[in-house]
Amino acid sequence: MQSALVPAVIEMRGIGKVFDIGAMEVHVLSDIHLDIRRGEFVSIAGPSGCGKTTLLSLMGVLDIPTYGTFRFLGQSMSGLGRRARARLRNQHIGFVFQAFNLIGDMTVIENVELPLSFRDGMSRRERADRAASALADVGMAHRTRHYPDQLSGGQQQRVAVARALAGEPSILLADEPTGNLDLRNGETVMALLSRLHASGRTICMVTHDERFSSVADRTIRLLDGCIIDETTYRQRQREAEAGLDERRSTESFP
């Protein structure tokens, strides 16, 4: 876990989310305590329906918690109005979803530029330069004038990552970014996220795939809306090495 001296992008204390469905109350998240610090790569893992996507939606200020304290870059989200939340998302949060959500009749660079058009005071040239730089970062600079249907699934997801990066966000939130991809393309996208993290990006990723969750600095496991486990990359390495040593010992001394 990173030092407490590193500024937190996200701070959650006792967070819960309850949905009213008819006469029923459905408790989707309960008593979530979580920090994500600048420069971390955190994965949130767990089975379907455990609350992973709901938690990511709260982090991305797409929804608000029912109770608890949530601070983003030190600012309390309590009582923040819809417009203020939208402005915060546009300026500080990049989203990558399982569905690529590219607009079919727009070129690659037009798709990447689109969110920047909602930035006040940003010139057309600056939007184009940022989009081109983001596409270069994900290895898609040679495809700027192509359309989404001319790209593979992995390439479309890389464009979606570029779109999220173009706004220079404080954190990148990825919801099952490999979910619509085959193994090879999934590994390519994960290698990209790892490279972005190595360059200093802050990333939080939801995944149900243990192969991909294990690349993060920390893996947080949810079950029935509660955090049940948290492990670091080093802990997982030590556990894997211990398991290997145990297997070797068993093989040597049957």
Image (tube, helix red, strand yellow):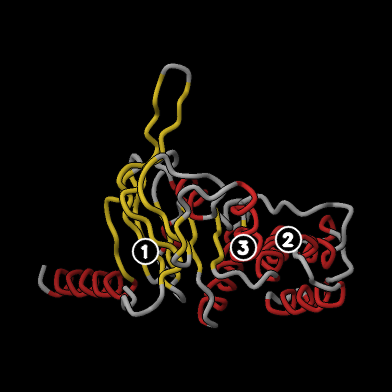
Residue drawn 31% across the image and 69% down it: 232
Quadrant showing the N terminus: bottom left
Judging depth in this view, the residue of 196 and 74 nearest the camera is 74
Mark 1 crowdedness (10 Å alpha carbons): few <14, some 14-19, many ≥20: some
Q: Which residue is mark 3?
A: 94
Q: Disc 3 versus disc 1: distance between alpha carbons? A: 18 Å
Q: Is residue 196 above or below residue 113?
A: below
Residue 71, disc: none
Q: Amino acid at mark 3?
A: Gly
Q: Which residue is mark 2?
A: 156
Residue 188 located left or right of residue 50: right
Residue drawn 75% across the image and 61% down it: 115
Q: Disc 3 versus disc 2: distance between alpha carbons? A: 16 Å
State the image coordinates of residue 179 (x, y, percent, origin top left): 57, 52
Q: Amino acid at mark 2?
A: Gln
Q: Amino acid at mark 1?
A: Asp
